[in-house]
Amino acid sequence: MPARLPPPSPTELPRLMFWRLRRNPLRRRNDLTQAWIGIGLLASALAATPPAMFLAGDSAYGHYSRIAEQQAATRHHTTATLLENARRHPEPGSAEARETRYPTKVRFTDPHGRARTATADVEPALPKGSTIRIWADGDGKITEPPLSPDQVRNRAMGSALVAVLAVHAGAAAAYGTAHHIIQRRNLAAWDSEWARTAPRRRTSP
């Protein structure tokens, strides 16, 4: 049984496609078919990239913009008071300490004017009675701030990039499927040809 050849790498695809387009005595009809399939898929992927980027990015931008507006309308920026001392960082003044936040009990007023007690992440070593700024939702729970314009834009750009990758991954998968089918047909043709020629080879003087 002939050894199974590994699929071509992405850097080899253009060379293999154009090799199949050149006239030579070893080229089969399936080779030419595979080359044109590859060229067609490549052209389709390149043509589909700009609209895919625009449609995915525009849709994501609208989606996250609506989320940001809804969050801004339902979240409340208020002041909270620490009910206990925040933990101290083992390395005060270090870069890690400046980035670290510790869960600490705080009291604040929700959007309906009611006093609430919750746990918020605060800077190390803040003493009891200190005040911090927090965001709370309509239910009086501490939450993240609304999405910023930069966050909305970054998420839209990420969606556009995913759409581009999906287009090219789909084209690559389609080419791989076509390559697999054509290879199987070639192997079947070789087996059939060998079945016809092998008896003549054994009976020849």
Image: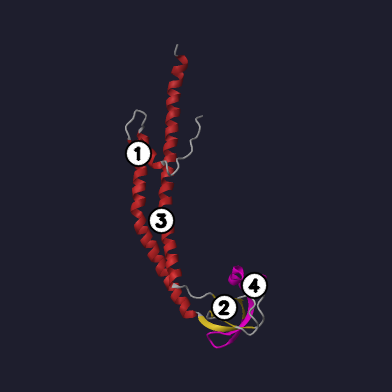
Of the residues shown, which amino acid type is indicated by label 1?
Phe
Q: Earlier in the sequence, mark 2 or mark 4?
A: 4
Coordinates of residue 175 in the picture (x, y in percent): 41, 44
Q: Nearer the viewer, residue 88 or 76?
A: 88
Coordinates of residue 148 in the picture (x, y in percent): 45, 73
Mark 2 crowd level (few <14, some 14–19, many ≥20, 10 Å Cα)? many
Residue stretch rendered in magenta on the structure: 89-117
Q: CA distance from mark 4 to mark 3?
A: 46 Å
Of the residues shown, which amino acid type is indicated by label 3?
Val
The tag on residue 18 is 1
Left or right of residue 143: residue 7? left
Q: Earlier in the sequence, mark 4 or mark 1?
A: 1
Residue occupied by mark 3: 164
The tag on residue 92 is 4
Residue occupied by mark 2: 142
Left or right of residue 133: residue 92? right
Of the residues shown, which amino acid type is indicated by label 2?
Ile
